[in-house]
């Protein structure tokens, strides 16, 4: 039975084929239409979705492919998948329209791959079957490889290769973990299946050692994609070299494939291992938040700065995930959407300046507030969204990730605190991550101070070509940024509907964790008591412990 | 600790904080809504490329609307039954799951009680007046700059209103960060000036350091109380329990959470380690300094502590309050010492703001919320007056702020109002007996001497430090006044250092003035600026009677505080058995002792006791009137002696020269390097730069290099491994990608095999 999701996946594919077949001159127009049309079915999907039961799969459909192996082509979405699909569909036209003046040579290839990429990304979120998931997951690499390789800046070849190989290696390792789970299922149930829901229920029963192994494999794979410290170094390079549309889609959606993978598979498959290793993952996230943030601070290249800021920001996202409670997870999912909007917008802004001045160096750019007031207003706006200013989108999710982490101490559970929600992190993790909030202000305002404020500089290389672009933004560019700005403002002022939409899915994901976390807390309590009896080194919990 | 039981009983007998019960009308939201509308309209004006003063007048109109709303709310709200919560809509709602009913709920909702009412009255009122002043002050920048200014101005008032009226900690945080943003935008208003941009950035980042504390406080509050909404929160605290009914006294809850709130408050209110952003913030346009960096935003920290006061008071050891009292007093003294040696009149006002904020915190620390809040109120008026006067001078003399290059401004035509207002402001700041600033400062000073030592750590020392500061304040304030406003008329035009150079030139030209010193004529403030200055000066006089109405509550401010959460436990006056040390009234007198000049509520015993500290044998409040009155006059006299002009019919005996005062220089020699150090602000900025910023920068560079060389290097090494292996095996290896891929596929195949084997075994 065909479902809405098929339309959403196939439509971009169809347009991609059309672009490939049509003459080069028409590529841009077809891509524009092709990016706008899926908004229709997406709105229908949003409208028809039963938000009250957002944890269930909707628009489910599957075709048997190889019955003996249990291979099916299954699609279906819960609320989190659908929201991420909505983000993908929304960013589609932004990327296409944002490339109008930037891409001149060989538009066919550019728009073709860009449109095809949409299909793959939607496929990742919509998959209910591991095989579909993995195929789409891997297929996202190819279009971006092409986009970076052909349309990037000077160092694009190296960036594209590195991006491809690094993330590919990561996904292979993740595949190993997924395959292990499939084998495990077969060992217990005796049949082959790749259905994610079924696998989730059997995978949870794995012994802790096996869970740890799967956790390692999956985390290695998805962490590269996120990217989590220390497997992040492909990202600054890829981002810096990618064309604007590539950066927007990379920051907006592709990185979220990693966090989505953690959300869906790591948290779903191996709860016990997650509880055991959450502190470790959290420590890596926090290192990433601060380490990458400080690196941002010494960048000269604006785009590289924003690229590193993604590493820092996504640290919050992963931290929220391993907080293992409602607030943290909801915040994290919200973060995926918010980061897509605000960082995507920042890349777009930087792209617009690059088109005009052919430089991204802060040594050459400066004082744009006097020459480009409209651009500057947008830039400051999105910087503030990214800094996490309350009232804009970034704050809500960042706050929720931090509070979720704060709540997630076993000590709170033991003390029966009203705001306790289980988990294996705690206030010290939240406090450490909180420094990221300060660092974010440092590097983003440093950039704003250099680029937006100050005395106007006139970079060389301006005003030769691209005469079609006015000094300040044109209507097309303003509209694009306005759409994103409305999104940022809307999600900052009234995030409740989205939070409530995410919650059912989060609750379902966390359902297996309740008892485990209780047990974990009790165990920590026992250990803590034993430790204090022996007068050995005090545990971290003793800091928060009541008197 | 032996005193604790007695104090416990006292607190147990208390009424507790006032918690607004009812439902406030939704229209109180207009106080925040109208400025928000104004901000939106300024954006529209910018889009329409409006080149007139329309955005300014629009702003003033809407802000006046906000003030009228505040007045209306006050008229209705003086009956405490109508204080309450007005909920506009649900902003953030996230259930915490885990079978718990608790949820993070933050509405756009307004909590109206005496404290928020008082703050809203002066915030909206001052914003209107200073908005009016600004319409003229930034007129040289009509067009986009004008829109930008008033956009941020409006947004500031919106944020401040949200902060003050918030009915939950998260909305408070929204306002908190919002005022930070507006402060950032407005300090950096002259964005072509590197100093302004740097100052803006510094302000934002230093505030964020404090904000981390506030964020953690919100987290801890939520975990302990299961709510961040004020009403349920304060009900728990009033009952002394957390959400599970366990007592919070003697736990970390009443120590750690208040200290975290304090960290946030210190960032916003420029206290102790976090003050250095505020003097730099003087780079902003002067109306901004007046409104944001003197009267309203910087008092947000005081507001926060006053708002959360029940939590502070719940700690019987009063650790957080001791910290606040001492930090406040030290900051007051420190900033005054720096102000002593500065020459930039606006910076001096900036430092004096830090110093006065120190008084307010000390007041909170020594448990006179009323005194602190009243000082906020009086300070808002007189400091805004002072800033606007400085602004008028700056505006008139092309940005000149160096007191060595200005003299006799009061005698120049057109500066009469400015000079009179300046005098009024200076007298208030100096604490001349009878002024509003004198009364409010006295409440804090006196309380420091009556608060017993077991409540706050060495309160009398706090008091002495503040007394010394009061003297210094009187001196440095009048040093400015005597040098700049009296004496022979003599001036040098500034170099537009603080203005937007090109535009200001244009404005000068339009007035037909050359810009050289030869042809320079100061241009006096016109209607809008004069009106605003006069209004504020009148306001700072009008604050005096507020002290005498509702005397049983310690003045009008006291009666407002009394109907808020800042009204902490206030038991009846009685003597306990601890005799000279544990005067119960002493620690709690703020709301009990009617202080008016004649009414001393205490017996001789206590008076004698406190007389020990003051050496006057009087009731502490009365004694303080005398002591601080004398100190104020003495400070002013000293300023006249050093910096007053000669002559004027023998009235003045000063001996100032163009650059200083020989007498002062002679005195300064006894202090060794201290005066020089004070002039250089004790090198604190340099210190921070050396011990924090520079190392952090070095670390960042190291990280960056590490990232490129080590982490990425390892990746590249790993990536080149297959190629290297390949080249060993097959020398005819072609192409990098190929090599990588071969190795990778082989590697993953091995891995896959391993996994499959593990699975099968």
Image (spheres, coloured by chain):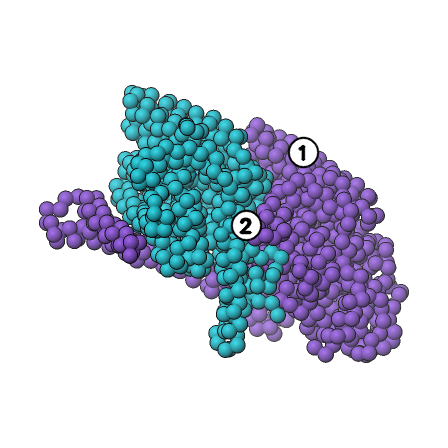
Chain colours: A cyan, B purple
Residue closer to the observer: B295 or B585: B585
- Residue B491 image offset from top left, x and y in percent: 62, 50
Query: In this rendering, does residue A352 appear at all?
Result: no
Residues marked 2 and 1 touching at CB (< 8 Å): no
Q: Secondary structure at mark 1?
A: helix
Graded by Cα atoms within 10 Å as few (under 14), some (14 to 19) or many (20 or more), the crowding at tag 1 reads: some
Side of B750 relative to B202 (left or right)? left
> Please, is residue B668 above or below residue B266 in the view?
below
Side of B671 relative to A271 (left or right)? right
Q: Which mark is residue A327?
A: 2
Q: Quadrant of the C terminus of chain A?
A: bottom right
Q: Quadrant of the N terminus of chain A?
A: top left
Which residue is under mark 1?
Answer: B58
Side of B211 relative to B693 (left or right)? right
Residue B351 falls in image quadrant: bottom right
> Please, is residue A405 above or below residue B42 in the view?
below
Residue name at image x 80 percent, y 71 percent: B584
Residue closer to the observer: A478 or B288: A478
Residue closer to the observer: A308 or A322: A322
Graded by Cα atoms within 10 Å as few (under 14), some (14 to 19) or many (20 or more), the crowding at tag 2 reads: many
Report in which chain the residue with disc 1 lies: B
Residue name at image x 44 percent, y 34 percent: A60
Q: Residue furthest right?
A: B598
- Residue B128 image offset from top left, x and y in percent: 71, 41
Q: Which mark is residue B304?
A: none
Residue name at image x 86 percent, y 59 percent: B552
- Residue B264 image offset from top left, x and y in percent: 60, 57
């Amino acid at each position: 039975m065909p479902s809405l999701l098929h339309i959403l996946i196939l439509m971009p594919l169809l347009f991609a084929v059309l672009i490939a077949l049509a003459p080069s001159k028409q590529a841009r127009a077809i891509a524009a239409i092709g990016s706008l049309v899926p908004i229709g079915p997406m709105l229908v999907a949003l409208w028809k979705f039963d938000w009250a039961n957002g944890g269930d799969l909707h628009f489910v459909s599957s075709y048997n492919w190889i019955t003996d192996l249990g291979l099916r082509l299954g699609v279906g979405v819960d609320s989190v998948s659908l929201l991420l699909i909505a983000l993908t569909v929304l960013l589609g036209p932004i990327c296409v329209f944002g490339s109008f003046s930037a891409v001149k040579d060989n538009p066919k290839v550019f728009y073709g791959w860009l449109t095809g990429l949409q299909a793959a990304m939607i496929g990742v979120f919509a998959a209910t079957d591991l095989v579909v998931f993995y195929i789409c997951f891997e297929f996202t690499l190819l279009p971006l490889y092409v986009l970076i390789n052909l349309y990037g800046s000077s160092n694009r070849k190296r960036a594209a290769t590195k991006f491809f190989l690094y993330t590919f290696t990561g996904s292979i390792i993740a595949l190993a973990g997924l395959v292990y789970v499939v084998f495990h299922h077969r060992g217990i149930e005796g049949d082959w299946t790749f259905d994610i829901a079924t696998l989730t229920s059997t995978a949870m029963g794995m012994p802790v050692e096996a869970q740890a192994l799967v956790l390692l494999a999956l985390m290695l794979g998805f962490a590269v994609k996120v990217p989590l410290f220390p497997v992040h170094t492909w990202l600054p390079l890829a981002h810096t070299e990618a064309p604007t549309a590539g950066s927007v889609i990379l920051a907006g959606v592709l990185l979220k494939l990693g966090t989505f993978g953690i959300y869906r598979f790591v948290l779903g498959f191996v709860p016990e291992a997650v509880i055991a290793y959450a502190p470790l993952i959290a420590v890596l996230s926090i290192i990433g938040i601060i380490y990458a943030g400080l690196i941002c601070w010494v960048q000269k290249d604006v785009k590289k700065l924003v690229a590193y800021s993604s590493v820092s920001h996504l640290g919050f996202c992963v931290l929220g995930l391993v907080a293992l409670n409602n607030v943290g997870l909801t915040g994290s999912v919200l973060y995926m959407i918010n980061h897509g909007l605000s960082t995507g917008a920042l890349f777009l802004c930087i792209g617009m300046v690059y088109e005009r001045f052919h430089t991204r160096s802060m040594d050459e750019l400066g004082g744009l507030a006097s020459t480009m007031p409209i651009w500057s207003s947008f830039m400051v706006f999105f910087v503030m969204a990214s800094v996490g200013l309350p009232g804009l989108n970034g704050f809500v999710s960042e706050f929720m990730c931090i509070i979720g982490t704060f709540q997630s101490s076993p000590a709170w559970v033991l003390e029966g605190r009203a705001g306790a929600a289980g988990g294996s992190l705690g206030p010290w993790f939240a406090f450490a991550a909180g420094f990221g909030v300060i660092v974010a202000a440092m590097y983003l305002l440093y950039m704003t101070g250099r680029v937006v404020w100050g005395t106007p500089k006139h970079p060389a290389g301006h005003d030769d070509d691209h005469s079609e672009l006015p000094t300040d933004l044109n209507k097309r560019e303003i509209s694009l940024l306005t759409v994103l700005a409305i999104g940022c403002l809307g999600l900052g002022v009234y995030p409740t509907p989205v939070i409530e939409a995410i919650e059912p899915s989060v609750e379902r994901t966390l359902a297996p964790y309740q008892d485990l976390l209780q047990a974990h807390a009790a165990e920590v309590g026992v250990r803590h008591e034993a430790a204090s009896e022996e007068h050995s080194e005090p545990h971290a919990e003793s800091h928060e412990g009541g008197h | 600790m032996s005193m604790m039981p007695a104090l416990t009983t006292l607190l147990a007998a208390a009424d507790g904080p006032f918690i607004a019960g009812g439902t406030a009308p939704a229209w109180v939201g207009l106080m925040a809504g109208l400025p928000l509308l104004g901000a939106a309209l300024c954006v529209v004006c910018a889009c329409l490329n409006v080149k007139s003063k329309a955005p300014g007048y629009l702003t003033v109109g809407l802000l006046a609307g906000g003030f009228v709303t505040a007045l209306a709310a006050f008229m209705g709200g003086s009956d405490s039954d109508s204080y309450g919560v007005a909920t506009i809509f649900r902003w953030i709602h996230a259930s915490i799951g885990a079978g718990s009913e608790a949820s993070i709920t933050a509405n756009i909702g307004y909590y109206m009680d005496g404290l928020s009412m008082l703050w809203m009255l002066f915030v909206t009122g001052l914003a209107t007046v200073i908005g009016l002043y600004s319409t003229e002050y930034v007129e040289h920048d009509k067009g986009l700059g004008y829109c930008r200014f008033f956009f941020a101005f409006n947004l500031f008032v919106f944020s401040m209103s949200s902060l003050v009226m918030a009915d939950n900690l998260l909305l408070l945080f929204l306002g908190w960060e919002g005022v930070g943003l507006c402060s950032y935008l407005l300090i950096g208003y002259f964005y072509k000036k590197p100093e302004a941009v740097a100052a803006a950035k510094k302000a934002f980042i230093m505030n964020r350091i404090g904000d981390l504390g506030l964020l953690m406080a919100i987290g801890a509050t939520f975990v302990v109380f299961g709510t961040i909404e004020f009403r349920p929160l304060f009900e728990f605290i009033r009952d002394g329990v957390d959400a599970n009914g366990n007592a919070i006294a003697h736990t970390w809850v009443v120590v750690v959470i208040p200290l975290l709130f304090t960290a946030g408050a210190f960032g916003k209110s420029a206290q102790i380690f976090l003050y250095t952003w505020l003097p730099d913030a003087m780079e902003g346009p002067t109306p901004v300094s007046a409104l944001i960096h003197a009267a309203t935003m910087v008092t947000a920290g005081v507001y926060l502590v006053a708002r959360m006061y029940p939590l502070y008071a719940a700690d019987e050891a009063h650790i957080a309050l001791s910290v606040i009292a001492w930090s406040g007093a030290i900051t007051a003294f420190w900033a005054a010492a720096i102000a002593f040696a500065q020459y930039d009149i606006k910076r001096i006002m900036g430092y004096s703001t830090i110093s006065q904020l120190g008084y307010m915190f000390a007041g909170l620390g020594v448990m006179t919320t009323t005194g602190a809040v009243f000082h906020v109120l009086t300070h808002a008026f007189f400091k805004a007056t002072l800033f606007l006067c400085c602004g008028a001078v700056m505006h008139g003399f092309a940005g000149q702020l160096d007191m060595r290059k200005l003299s006799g401004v009061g005698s120049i035509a057109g500066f009469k109002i400015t000079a009179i207002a300046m005098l009024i402001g200076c007298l208030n700041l100096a604490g001349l007996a009878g002024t509003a600033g004198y009364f409010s400062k006295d409440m804090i000073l006196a309380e420091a001497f009556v608060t017993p030592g077991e409540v706050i750590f060495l309160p009398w020392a706090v008091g002495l430090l503040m007394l010394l500061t009061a003297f210094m304040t009187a001196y440095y304030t009048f040093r400015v006044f005597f040098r700049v406003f009296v004496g022979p008329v003599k001036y040098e035009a500034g170099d537009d250092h603080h203005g937007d150079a090109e535009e200001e030139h244009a404005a000068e030209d339009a007035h037909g003035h050359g810009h050289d010193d030869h042809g320079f004529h100061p241009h006096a403030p016109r209607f809008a600026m004069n009106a605003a200055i006069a209004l504020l000066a009148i306001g700072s006089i009008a604050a005096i009677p507020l002290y005498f109405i509702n005397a049983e509550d310690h003045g009008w401010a006291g009666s407002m505080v009394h109907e808020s959460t800042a009204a902490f436990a206030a038991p009846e006056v009685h003597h306990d058995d601890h005799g000279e040390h544990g005067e119960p009234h002493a620690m709690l007198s703020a709301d009990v002792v009617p202080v008016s000049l004649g009414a001393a509520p205490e017996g001789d015993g206590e008076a004698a006791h406190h007389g020990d500290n003051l050496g006057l044998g009087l009731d502490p409040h009365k004694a303080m009137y005398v002591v601080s009155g004398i100190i104020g006059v003495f400070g002013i006299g000293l300023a006249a002696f050093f910096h007053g002009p000669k002559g004027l019919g023998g009235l003045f005996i000063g001996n100032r020269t163009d650059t200083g005062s020989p007498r002062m220089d002679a005195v300064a020699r006894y202090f060794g390097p201290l005066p020089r150090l004070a002039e250089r602000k004790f090198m604190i900025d340099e210190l921070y730069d050396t011990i924090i910023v520079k190392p952090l920068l070095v670390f960042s560079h190291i990280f960056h290099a590490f990232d490129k060389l080590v982490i990425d290097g390892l990746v590249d090494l790993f990536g080149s491994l297959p190629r290297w292996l390949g080249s060993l095996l097959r020398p005819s290896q072609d192409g990098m990608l190929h090599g990588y891929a071969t190795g990778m596929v082989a590697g993953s195949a091995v891995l896959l095999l391993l996994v499959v084997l593990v699975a099968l075994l």
